[in-house]
Amino acid sequence: MRRLALVLVLTFVAAPLFAIDSPTATKFLRAYVDAICTENAGDHQKAVSTITPFAMSTAPQLSKSAKEFANGELRASAISAAWAIVNEGSKMEFAVGRRERRDALNALRASFGKSISDGPKKGQNELEIAAATMAYFLTQELQDVAHPRRMSPRGGSAF
């Protein structure tokens, strides 16, 4: 879990380089979740064909995530996918609406079980870790995570 948190914090720093427009992010999120759920259902070919159209995207995180998924690098793909749905502006925020995130989370829960949104756990396989990473990310409020240097009320670091 610490590794996931570290990766997410580090990638927040690079988010301005990878922002994409909302319609593309929404289409990608739907395709990514469909691919994960299809893979879980046992149809590898269909899962790969669902995400492959994004491999040629000019948005680096979309392309990277799609290629990683097709190559079986599911953990890395989930992290790239998480950043593909984030916009960077004056404040960091999701590039997809709350409804789309909720629908994606519900699809992941339907395919993997409700506990998938608790994040990756020991003993999960690569596919479950990828699904849990995306589900956990979809439950977060980015504004709180995007400011890791804010101070706690007692004067120490919030972390």
Image (cartoon, rainbow, N blue to C red):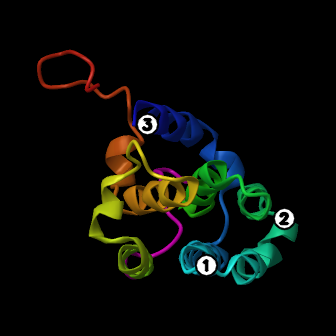
Residue 88: tell me if it is visible: no
In the rendered structure, find residue 5 and report the number of the disc placed on it.
Answer: 3
Above or below, comparing residue 13 to residue 80 in the picture: above
Is label 2 or label 3 in front? 3
What percent of the width, then of the height, locates residue 125?
52, 53
Measure the C-alpha gap from mark 3 to mark 1. 29 Å
Residue that numbered label 2 is attached to: 58
The picture places residue 24, in percent across and down from the top left corner, at: 67, 77
Q: Quadrant of residue 39?
A: bottom right
Q: Nearer the viewer, residue 130 or 28?
A: 130
- Is 80 displayed left or right of 155 in the figure? right
Q: Earlier in the sequence, mark 1 or mark 2?
A: 1
Give the amino acid at mark 2: Thr
Q: CA distance from mark 1 to mark 2?
A: 30 Å
Q: Secondary structure at mark 2?
A: loop
Q: Is residue 92 magenta?
A: yes
- Which range is magenta? 87-99
Q: Which mark is residue 63?
A: none
What residue is pinned by disc 1? 42
Question: What residue sits 40% from the left and 82% below the top?
Answer: 103
Q: Earlier in the sequence, mark 2 or mark 3?
A: 3
Q: Give the image quarter of residue 72.
A: bottom right
Is residue 148 something that shows in the picture? yes
Q: Nearer the viewer, residue 159 or 69?
A: 69
Label 3 CA crowd tier, 10 Å (few <14, some 14–19, many 20+): few
Name above or below for residue 111 compared with residue 80.
below
